[in-house]
Structure formats: C-alpha cells, structure tokens
C-alpha cells in the first residue's frame, strides 16, 4: 500500500483536510502529522515530521502545504534524502516526478482551488521517474 505523509501549517489546513478525504477515497494510507487546526503554526515543525517518514520509508511520498508552498519546500529540502518541488499545475507535478524524482510535493494552499489541487496530487502520485540518463545524472549531482 502507498502511504502518504501529510503536513501543513495553519494556511494549508483547510486544503489538507479536503485532500485527505480525496486520498482516502483513492485507497491511500495517510500519516497526518499536523497541524490539526487553524491556529498559527510553524510549517517547518510539521514538514520535518512528514519528511522523516519519507526518508525512513514509513511513507512513500509526502504532501506538504503552506500558504505559498515555498517555505514548506525549503524546509523539506533541508532533510537529506528529500527532493521536494512546489507544484501549481499538473504539468509541473508530472515533471517534478518524471525529471527530478521528487518524493515530496509542496502545494501553495492559498493559491490553488481544491479541484486543481486534486489533479496536481493525483498526477504527482501516479507519475513514475523516467530513469533517463540525463535525469539520473542531474539527481546524482544534487546528492
């Protein structure tokens, strides 16, 4: 079973709740590490928890959400073994997986509607890394 580590701050809480329902309907197992409300919170705390689950292989992927997605993406990429990208449409989500083998999707919770977010998450989770030599070479250089 594919496990998804979910994390957000207060700005991403509403979207995370909706995406959790969508992902459960699609038979994904969720590991929700918070936040669990709309009181102001610090995204690095929750993002780091989600990323540790991905690195330890307890989760297959992470989905992290803050207002712009940028802070969550930066926090995620501080963790060795994580490759995160901010995705705002299906094409960017597809390329994040296909070309960069991203394992954590960062979403801009204040700038996406639910339907677009659904499509982005679905595309991210269902796109495979290409394993093309040029992409493998570039990822190796990132390590």
Image: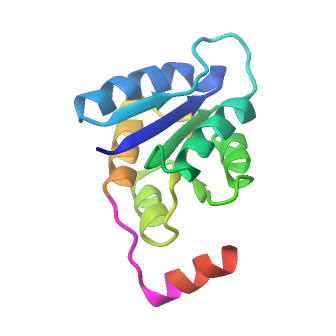
Percent from the top left, x then y, of residue 93?
44, 56
Q: Residue 108, how many percent across, how many down?
A: 58, 38
* Quadrant occupied by the N terminus: top left
Task: Please identify the dominant SS of the magenta region.
Answer: loop
Q: Is residue 51 magenta?
A: no
Q: Quadrant of residue 13?
A: top right
- Describe residue 24's horizontal placement relative to residue 65 as left or right: left
Q: Residue at x 58, y 34 (%)?
A: 65
Image check: 54 left or right of 74? left
In the image, residue 139 lies at what x, y percent?
Answer: 59, 76
Res 110 seen here: no
Q: Which residues are drawn in magenta?
A: 127-135
- Name the quarter where the C terminus is drawn: bottom right
- Looking at the image, which residue sits at the far bottom? 133
The mark total stands at 0
**Residue 108 shows in the view:** yes
Residue at image coords 48%, 25%: 15
Q: Residue at x 69, y 54 (%)?
A: 77
Assess whether residue 130 is covered by the magenta stretch. Answer: yes
| Rendered residue at 62%/80% (across/down) | 140
Q: What colour scheme has been applied to the protein in the rendered image?
A: rainbow
Viewer-closest of 32 and 110:
32
Q: Position of residue 54 (x, y in %)?
A: 53, 48
């Amino acid at each position: 079973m594919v496990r998804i580590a979910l994390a957000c701050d207060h700005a991403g809480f509403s979207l995370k709740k909706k995406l959790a329902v969508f992902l459960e309907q699609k038979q994904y197992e969720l590991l929700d590490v918070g936040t669990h409300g709309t009181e102001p919170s610090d995204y690095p705390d929750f993002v780091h928890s989600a990323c540790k689950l991905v690195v330890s292989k307890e989760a297959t992927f992470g989905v992290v959400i803050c207002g712009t997605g940028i802070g969550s993406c930066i926090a995620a990429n501080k963790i060795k073994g994580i490759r995160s990208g901010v995705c705002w449409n299906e094409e960017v989500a597809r390329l994040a997986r296909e070309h960069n083998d991203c394992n954590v999707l960062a979403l801009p919770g204040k700038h996406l509607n639910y339907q677009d977010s659904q499509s982005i998450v679905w595309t991210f989770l269902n796109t495979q890394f290409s394993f093309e030599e040029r992409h493998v070479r570039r990822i190796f250089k990132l390590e």
